[in-house]
Amino acid sequence: VQLQASGGGLVQAGGSLRLACAASGSTFSTYADHWYRQAPGKYRELVATISRGGGTNYADSVKGRFTISRDNAKNTVYLAMNSLKPEDTAVYYCHTADRYRDYWGQGTLVTVSS
């Protein structure tokens, strides 16, 4: 499985971005999909999860502002981010796993200016 993340950029506070994570390879046996983020000097944190069945979970800090979704036909997972805050600035990574290992995208930088 290979993951390719895209969609990051510079946005003003209150703005929106949509990240995409395109998967290729043997994705049929993977588990849930996730978005993580890592801000400078901080640990990587889980932001959002979407299960194989479509159930979603969010970190409290993004609940109500971020939406994770999946397009199965395109093998792509999205993270729609609204009402962005400067504290959302981080490198965002997509992640999935199967019975053998974890898979990470290369990361996409989101910078929110105040």
Image (cartoon, rainbow, N blue to C red):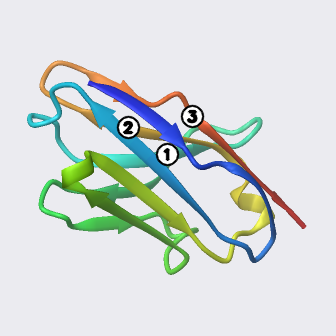
Q: Which residue is mark 3?
A: 107
Task: Give x and y (percent) for residue 43.
Answer: 61, 37
Mark 3 to mark 2: distance in Å?
10 Å
Say how many tags the image has. 3
Is 15 or 58 nearer to us in this picture? 15
Residue at 16%, 18% in the rendered image: 100
Lower sequence index among marks 3 and 2: 2
Q: Which residue is mark 2?
A: 95
Task: Give x and y (percent) for residue 61.
Answer: 58, 68
Instruction: Name the secondary structure under disc 1.
Output: strand
Mark 3 to mark 1: distance in Å?
9 Å
Residue at 61%, 74% in the rendered image: 82
Q: Amino acid at mark 1?
A: Tyr
Instruction: Name the secondary structure under disc 3.
Output: loop
Q: Which residue is mark 1?
A: 36
Label 2: few (<14), some or many (≥20) within 10 Å?
many
Residue projecting furthest to the top = 100
Instruction: Name the secondary structure under disc 2.
Output: strand
Label 1: few (<14), some or many (≥20) within 10 Å?
some
Mark 1 to mark 2: distance in Å?
7 Å
Side of 55 where 16 appears, left or right: right
